[in-house]
Each structure stands twice: as structure tokens, then as C-alpha cells.
Image (spheres, grey):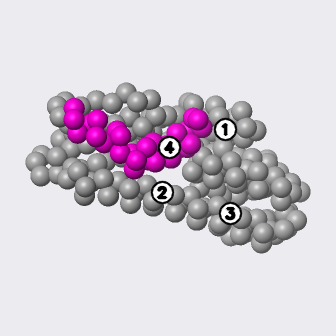
Amino acid sequence: MSEIFISAKAKNFGDHKKDFYIKNSFEFIENLDLFIYNITKVSDAITSLKFNLNRNEFSDFIIKDQKHFITDEENKEIYLFDSFEKPELLKDLIIKANKEVFNRRAKITELINQLQYDYMIQINPWYKHSKARLYLSDENENKESFGHIDLLNNKHYMKNNQELLNTLIKDKRVRIISKFYKISEGIK
């Protein structure tokens, strides 16, 4: 009998986020760089999908057959139908959860574009290893960063123009972006 897991790619996870997944019953598969959650019924799938959704991570399913993980799409589909009680429901739930994550990420991109337009600066988001920042640069000159807004720890930096930094930090859109990344990291 095959086992089915909901998975999340751990490529850019920092230690904090990895620990958070492990504390919530996900298992880390190092050679695949995935966190997996074993599901046997629809309620398990909903639990793990909600967890990924709340962390703003895309979900997929992966199948383990006789100690071997099946990653090929064609085989995976066949095993899903043989192994899970309601495979169409599982696929539908994954699609809906991933669509929500996509929409959230698109909203963040839209907010960053609005900030760039309103403040006439270049803003480059950066999110890796449990750190999230918005790097700020002049849109007209050499585009070298003149500061950043730390979205998780409030350790901001600005070479000059402290007034611009203070204004950006107070902007509601920056707070929404910060909240998105804090949720992704499991920070309240």
C-alpha cells in the first residue's frame, strides 16, 4: 500500500521556519528538500493544506511506495487514485490552497509596485533564511541600495534620508507586507 503526503518545498526555509514545520508534525526529507505530512483521510489533508496556506507556501502531494518516493507526475497520479479515499477532492483542495497563496503573493507584489510609484524609489523584496527585507534604491541613479526595511525584526537601515524611512515604516502597505512575511515565518 502506498502512503500519500502533502509536501512543501523547503528550499529557502530558515531555521525558524524549519523548526516550526517540525513542531507541527511535518517530516523533513533532506534528499528531496521537502517537508511532508502523512495523510490517510481528507481531514489530514485539510489540516496540512491549511498549515501551508497559513505559512503562504504552495502545496503538492508526494507518494511513497515501498520506501521509495514517487516524484514523476504520471506515476504520482495513478498512485493517488489507488491510495486515497477521495483523490479528486484532494487535488481540488490543493489547487484551491495554491490559488490562494498565489493571490496573496500577487497582492504583495501589487503593494510593492504602489509604494514604488508613490515614493518614486525602487523596492526589491528579499526573503531567505528567516529574514525578510525591502531593499530601497533610487530609481533614477545607479540603483545601488541606500537602505532597507526589515520586515520581521524592525532592524531598519538607511544611509541617509531618515525621514523617508520613517514615512515608509508608518505606511499601512508596508505593515501589510510585514504581516505577510511574519505569518510566513510563524511569527505573531
**Mark 3: few/some/many CA within 10 Å (<14, 14-19, 20+):** many
Whole-number angstrom distance, CA of label 4 to CA of label 1: 19 Å
**Mark 1: few/some/many CA within 10 Å (<14, 14-19, 20+):** many
Q: Which residue is mark 4?
A: 179
Residue located 37% across and 27% down the image: 155
Q: Can residue 147 be found in the magenta stretch?
A: no
| Mark 2 or 4, nearer chain start | 2
| Mark 3 or 4, nearer chain start | 3
The magenta span reads: 162-188
Q: Amino acid at mark 2?
A: Arg
| Mark 4 or 1, nearer chain start | 1
Q: Nearer the viewer, mark 3 or mark 2?
A: 2
| Mark 3 or 2, nearer chain start | 3
Q: Which residue is mark 3?
A: 94
Q: Main secondary structure of the magenta part?
A: helix
Lateral position of residue 134 relative to residue 83, left or right: left
Q: Which residue is mark 1?
A: 21
Of residues 91 and 111, the one nearer the viewer is 111
Q: Nearer the viewer, mark 2 or mark 4?
A: 4
